[in-house]
Amino acid sequence: MTVLRTDRLLLRGWRDSDLGPWEALNADPEVREHFPDVLTREQSEASASRFRAGLDRRGWGWWAVKVRATGEFIGFAGLDPVEESMPFTGVEAGWRLARPAWGHGYATEAAMAVVTFGFETLALPEVLAITTAANHRSRAVMRRLGMTHEPAEDFDDMSVPAGPLRRTVVYRLANEDRSAL
């Protein structure tokens, strides 16, 4: 399995010791503000199990993120093929960090590492990212990566209850346009 290192972060496979902080992160209403619900312990454990399986199968996917200086687990970041139910195809970059990790540039640093891995190791022609229209923090990370908003691809995610979380925006970055990384 691939491990990614940045100046401050380690993106690695999931460990049993990650489950407690992962569950707490997903139970935080502020972290889950742009999702329909917080996750139960069982839902968080199931997601970590899926992430482990993806990493084991492909060698890449949704990595656990820890701060190198402290060893603290702060969330996840990675790449995953877009689900078949989406109105487009490709490989998606994503991230989710615990609230105490916000505001330190960790999301951008982790996202840059996974996007660079996608281009340099996987030879992807492009990477995309999606979020709710109102998720200004994630959209700012996407812009810092050099991604471009594709308004014509924005869509209503029908798996989300009616309301402000349904509108989803799409950002893309082509390998040939990755000067920001």
Image: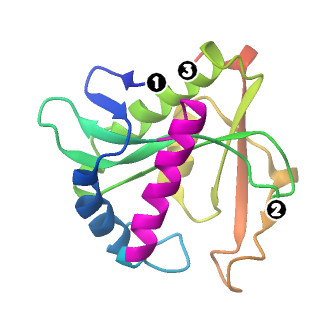
| Residue 32 picture location, percent across and down | 44, 70
**Secondary structure at numbered mark 3:** helix
Relative to 14, does residue 83 appear above or below in the rendering?
A: below
Query: Mark 1 or mark 3: which is in front?
Result: 1
Q: Residue at position x 24%, y 47% from top? A: 73
Relative to 29, does residue 134 appear above or below in the rendering?
A: above
What amino acid type should be assigned to the residue bearing mark 1?
Thr
Residue 61 in view: no
Query: Mark 1 or mark 2: which is in front?
Result: 1
| Residue 52 picture location, percent across and down | 46, 47
Mark closest to the chain's N terminus, 1 or 3: 1
Q: Is residue 45 magenta?
A: yes
Residue 95 in view: yes
| Disc number for residue 116 | 3
Label 1, on which residue?
A: 2
What amino acid type should be assigned to the residue bearing mark 2?
Ser
Q: Is residue 67 left or right of residue 85?
A: left
| Disc number for residue 85 | 2
Instruction: Point out the stretch of residues depicted in magenta.
Output: 42-62
Q: CA distance from mark 1 to mark 3?
A: 13 Å
Mark closest to the chain's N terminus, 1 or 2: 1
Mark closest to the chain's N terminus, 2 or 3: 2
Image quadrant in which you'd find residue 20: bottom left
Most foreground residue, 156 or 134: 156
Q: Residue at position x 51%, y 37% from top? A: 56
